[in-house]
Image (tube, coloured by chain):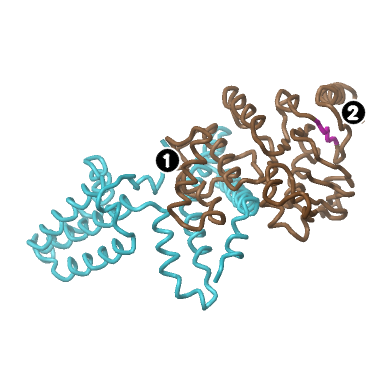
Chain colours: A cyan, B brown
Amino acid sequence: MTFSPLGSYLPGTGPLHRLRPGAKLLGLFAFATAAMALRSVPSTLIALALTIALGFLAGMRGRDFARVGLRFALIGAVLFAFQAWQHGWERGFAVVGTLFALILAASSLTASTSVDDLLDTIVWALGPLRRLGVRPERVALAFSLVLTSIPTVLGLARETREAARARGLERQPRAYLVPFVLRVVAHAQLTGEALQARGIDDDADAAPH
Amino acid sequence: MIELEGACVTAATAEGRTTILEPTTLRLTERRISIIGSNGSGKSTLARLLNGLIVPTSGSVSVRTDSGASARDTGARNARWLDTRTHGAQVRRLVGFAFTDPAAQLVMPTAIEDIALSLRRTHPKKQARLTAARQALAEFGLEALADRSVHTLSGGQKQLLALAAVLAARPAILVADEPTTLLDLRNSLLLRELLLRLPQQVIAVTHDLDLAAQADRTLVIDRARVVFDGPPEAAIDFYRQSVAGPRA
């Protein structure tokens, strides 16, 4: 299985999946503001309970929670230790708990929203900027290209490092950095060619304004 | 139908200008055309000339608007020639292009989104677009992969998906640059059958001589020029002998 930062989208038909991405983004914003403003032990408990429920609604299960929790564990532990030492454990719990609740809420958003929907929301939100010469479709395409390129670039990095190691050159950064950069540029050129061949930039030109 | 009139491609290098394709005049009308030849002989350049990804340094390449499957849309009477230099975007809508490496071609995160990207022009409404994309996936037996990340697909699945994405835009002609090179035996057989079944005119650059043999016409390219143009059996014999014989 290849690492994908977008592996977090879980296809489904639950209530969170049916909600418009714009509404979810606004909700996330409102929730974050409220949780940060309150930041007490009871409010943190409520926020955690709420976001775990949201996570379940978005289709997240034990494994998904564990993955999110593990990624947060290191920084969470350090932050808790510092806050508890400086301001007591209640404050430490409230800060770390609220932060984790926010991460869970954001994970529910990505778990219940496909990239395509998020891109549509970007296009919609950038709509008013059209008269300033901004092309929302092109911005959205750039976003999705970045998202899809991340796993590809990581894969290229792994391959070139393996190739250098196979030749016993792992101690020389140049032996893998140079081919790595060249391959990334070559990939970018091929992608550009493919976009042109598929007439994707023409679409942006032809889009009615 | 694609026509090359003295189309020539040169490039500037440190040692001066290098000819990548000598002036070439061709009329490509057959339904299945294969292009074979050694590495670096100019095959890929010729393929990229056909849909305007590369424009000739001199001479011209043009595509008939009533080519292949799109004949019913345009009608032969008002058909005209589109020059790749002046009508690049329109030419690329008529001539789809499948690359050797599907990884560079798949630009969206999931399979269905990648197909949907090809359909933005024809289906501006999102729901209709997704329905059409699902249908396009089903035509290639890929419907189960709709929501999968394109990075988690196997090589064969990626190549099929890339082809589905190109064909979803309903081009009249398909140019394929070594479509089976990265595939295992089962997948290259599958792809070969698929290419032969397509309603489109198919022009395939290939090292897969079995695939080349199933064309109606085969071009052999060597050192930047077309050195043989004829029935596939004779072309493949010619190619084998040119490789076996002494080279200047």
Q: Amino acid at mark 2?
A: Arg
Give the quadrant of the N terminus of chain A.
top left
Under circle 1, the secondary element is loop
Task: Report the span colored magenta.
Answer: B217-222
Q: Is residue B104 visible?
A: no
Chain ID, mark 1: B
**Around disc 1, counting alpha carbons within 10 Å, would you say few (fewer than 14), some (14 to 19), or many (20 or more)?**
some
Residue B21 in view (yes/no): yes
Q: Is residue B168 magenta?
A: no
For this view, does A85 lie left or right of residue A1? left
**Mark 2, secondary structure of its residue:** loop
Q: Amino acid at mark 1?
A: Arg
Residue drawn 21% across the image and 41% down it: A62
The chain containing the residue under callout 2 comes to B
Residue B220 lies within the magenta run: yes
Which residue has dot 2 on it?
Answer: B247
- Residue B3 rendering spot, x and y as whole percentages: 83, 46
Q: Could you tell me residue B20's position as x and y percent?
A: 83, 46
Residue drawn at x 59%, y 60% as measured from the top left:
A203
Q: Identify the residue at horizontal 61%, vertical 24% (top origin).
A: B189
Q: Residue furthest bottom?
A: A132
User: Would you call the spot at circle 2 few (<14 residues within 10 Å), some (14-19), or many (20 or more)?
Assistant: few
